[in-house]
Each structure stands twice: as C-alpha cells, then as structure tokens.
Image (cartoon, rainbow, N blue to C red):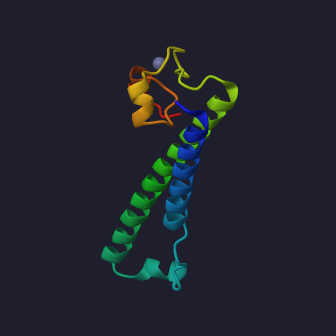
Amino acid sequence: MDPDRLRRTLAARRRQLTDELARLTERPADPVGNLSFGKRIGDGTNEAVDRINTTAAARSIAASIAELDRAVAKLDEGTYGRCDRCGRSIPLERLEARPWTSRCVECSRLGDSA
Ligand SMILES: [Zn+2]
C-alpha cells in the first residue's frame, strides 16, 4: 500500500471524526441551567438519556481518533501492518477495510479498544 496515500486517507478520516466530535460536544449552553432540575421529571430524564447517548458517541469517536493517531504513529515507527498486541502481521484485506487498525482480528476481538 502506498504510504502517502495511506497517510492522506488517515488524515481525511481524522478530520471527519474531529468535526463529528466537535458537533457532538459543542452543544448550545442551556439558558436555564440548573433551574431545569425543578422541572417535570420526564424532561430531566430525557435530557439525561440524551446526554448519556452523546457521551457514549463522543467516547467512541474519541477512541477512533486515538486509533487513527496510533496508525499514523505506526507508519512513523515502521510497524504499520503489524498487530500491536501479538506482533503478527495484519492481513492486507483487513488493512484495506480498516486502514487505521493497529490490531489483528483476533486481538481486536479480545475487547479493550485501547
Ligand atoms: Zn494480534
């Protein structure tokens, strides 16, 4: 795979995720602020659920950005295409589908997304 093209792909993807994260976290300030605690329970609950969903989405995007940064670091280190956990090479078709991946399929399945 052409490393320059790869870097461009990763950079473009990163920009996209960064924008998405910014949109998610940059919410308009609540004009009533803490006063909304006194409102009907339903309102507060919906708002809380909404906030939890946003937090989860933001966290998953942040994790993807970290993954991208790791992939770029691997390109710099010359370890790109090698699994961070077990050191085996990552199959090309996986890299083509997910160029930002830094783990092989088995290691990714093990869970922790670090
Ligand atoms: Zn592995």
Q: Quadrant of residue 75?
A: top right
Is 69 rendered above or below residue 89? Answer: below
Residue 62: x and y in percent read 54, 49
Residue 65: x and y in percent read 55, 46
Q: Quadrant of residue 42?
A: bottom left
Residue furthest out toward the right: 76
Is 88 on the left or on the right of 3, as rendered? left
Q: Is 33 or 8 nearer to us in this picture?
A: 8
Is 82 rendered above or below residue 43? Answer: above
Residue furthest out toward the bottom: 31
Is 110 on the left or on the right of 62, as rendered? left
Q: Is 19 or 40 nearer to us in this picture?
A: 19
Residue 52: x and y in percent read 42, 59
Is 113 on the left or on the right of 39, as rendered? right
Which residue is found at the position 66% from the left and 24% from the top? 78
Determine if residue 111 is in view: no
Determine if residue 31 is in view: yes
Residue 28: x and y in percent read 53, 78
